[in-house]
Image (cartoon, helix red, strand yellow):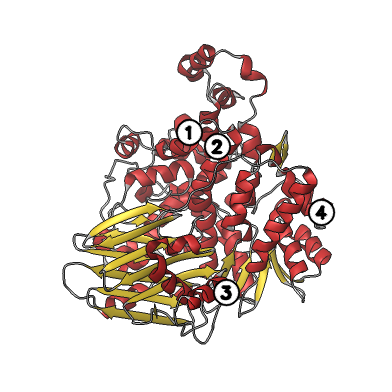
Amino acid sequence: MCGIAGIVNTSGAGVDEFTIQEMCQQIIHRGPDDAGVIVKGGAGLGMRRLSIIDLAGGHQPVFNEDRSAWIVFNGEIYNFPELRPELEDRGHLFRTHSDTEVIIHLYEEYGAGCVDRLRGMFAFAIYDERRKLLLLARDRLGKKPLHYAVTKDSLLFASEMKSILAVAPELATVDEKALLRYMLIGYIPDPETAFQNVRKLPPGHVLEYETGRVHIRQYWDLPDFGTYQPASEEACLEELEHELREAVRIRLISDVPLGAMLSGGTDSSTVVALMSRLSSSPIKSFSIGFRQADFNEAEYARRVAQKFGTDHQELILEPNVVETVESLTHSLEEPFGDSSMLPTYYISRLARQHVKVALSGDGGDELFAGYERYRIHLNERSFKYLPDWTKKLYRDTIHRKIPYRVPGRNLAYSISLPWQERYMEGVTIRAFVREMNLLSEDFQRRAAADEDPLLPFWHYLKTDSGQSPLSRVLYLDTKTYLPGDILTKVDRMSMLTSLEARCPILDHKFVEWVVALRPEWKMRGNDQKYIFRKLARRLGVPDEVLDRKKQGFALPLVHWMRNALKDLVLDTLLDTRTLQRGYLNPAGVRRLLLEHFAGRRDHSPRIWRLMMFELWQRNFLARIGSDVRSHAYEVAASPTTGRL
């Protein structure tokens, strides 16, 4: 596991080695064990290494036999032991035992098509000196990040944007369209970033840069949903266990200590169950908990650990949450609104004290329909009989006449929508923006530019209209929420602690098998994750873990918002600087805070999102320097003391 960075210049000018070293210095947390840089002509590639495989010989960059091509690589290739003999039979000579070297020889054989042979998580850059070509590639699901920026005569790339902006701060022009999407959904989906001139390479894509031209190609997508019907439930369980067992097995390859992040939920518990069967010694497991009983899952993680005899480490937290939030927003390169980043960071920090690699249960909800929103927003219930004209009449005429505080007002609006729009209302805060006027009209008008800011989401949701509604929302979430939120959170928080996180449920071969399953194997009536929960029970996961209400990676955000975080919230969101940036509507923000702290409604997720946006402005954006340009303009706002 590493962090990578580099520059390719097509103007004929050379690349300065110090510049590449400075880019790598920004991501030292991703690879504290080793560093490597090569600068030759118009190309410079660098990396920071977290040593996992071939500790002695895995130094990067890695070259082909005649040193005409070289690679820097972030990730793990789990099938490299099978690929290496095949390449040796074709005459390739190996100098190391690393998975990195397998990729460079695959490139010699297949060019950009080498990615089709790889099973794992990866982001890599190969420079082909003969062709003067740079190849960038990112894994199929988006586990490893890769950013790039194209200028008049060069391309810069890096695992994290801070590497690019450190040497080219002039590229940091804020992208208001992307910021509007953040406000609505809580993250910025690929290929956008918070900056107009920096882009994310989307998952399952390769980029070739040659003679100053960029060509991006998609090499993988999810297969058709619902094409496979197992002969019986027993046959389905047998296949499911076989496929997931293999995905777990290959992720146990490591030359350093390895463990599991155990939340006490179905997904991580199932992974631990399989790990315990595959390991000859007790596996190491890690969990965290909180003093607030409603949010403490440590008890369930403890029961799973006892069931499977793991070497379990547990930490009950009373964190300095203000200090943690301030610290994390100094490292986040764009606003990120998922508050579960905090427990992810805490458990990563705990695990890193004992191991370098930890398996997680991420991906189970997106594959097997585990989120409650699937049941809520896809259930037509009794309102199917209402004619469309009455629903439209309610939205266009009646809704705005009903007082804001009337119970059921927004539910009625949601019910009046077609299921696609109802789902999008549920996964965004569009209703709150509309009802409470949270965002300034000028910002929304400039950023939207007469285009629905959720247009990319509609593209995914409407793809292949013949699919079931469940299959279509699973496709949408796997293309957007999974890489943009879940995997971004896991990568950033684990790598901040120099921990490698592996996600066996998101093995691409396992994903392809699950996607093909008919939807009734995933959600049967109100029974979500139907077949996966059956497998978990079969593997011995305790009933009390499987039968309890789903919490996700919960944390006591409501409690913190009204106690430890209250001063930070008020001082941040009611500060004159915040309200004068031109993004928020001061009256809407004040009403949001007043309702929350008066106990009338729990607005903690919305408040968190707005607070993280402003802290990103202060703690990251402001540090880039005076070259940052934003189209947001100053608006009049009355002075405030930071209190309601």
For the residues labelled 3 and 1, the Cα–Cα distance comes to 40 Å
Amino acid marked by disc 3: Pro
Earlier in the chain: of badge 3 and badge 2, it is: 3
Residue 315's label in the rendered image is none
Single out the mark in the foreground, 3 or 2.
Answer: 3
Q: Which residue is mark 2?
A: 472
Q: Which residue is mark 4?
A: 538
Amino acid marked by disc 4: Arg
Earlier in the chain: of badge 3 and badge 4, it is: 3
Residue at 36 percent of width and 37 percent of height: 440
Of the pair 229 and 214, the residue shown nearer to us: 229
Q: Position of residue 133 (x, y in %)?
A: 28, 67
For the residues labelled 3 and 4, the Cα–Cα distance comes to 31 Å
Q: Which residue is mark 1?
A: 462
Neighbour class for label 1 at 10 Å: few (<14), some, many (≥20)? some
Does 224 sit above or below residue 210?
A: above
Label 2: element kind: helix
Q: Which residue is mark 3?
A: 81
Q: Position of residue 497 (x, y in %)?
A: 54, 71
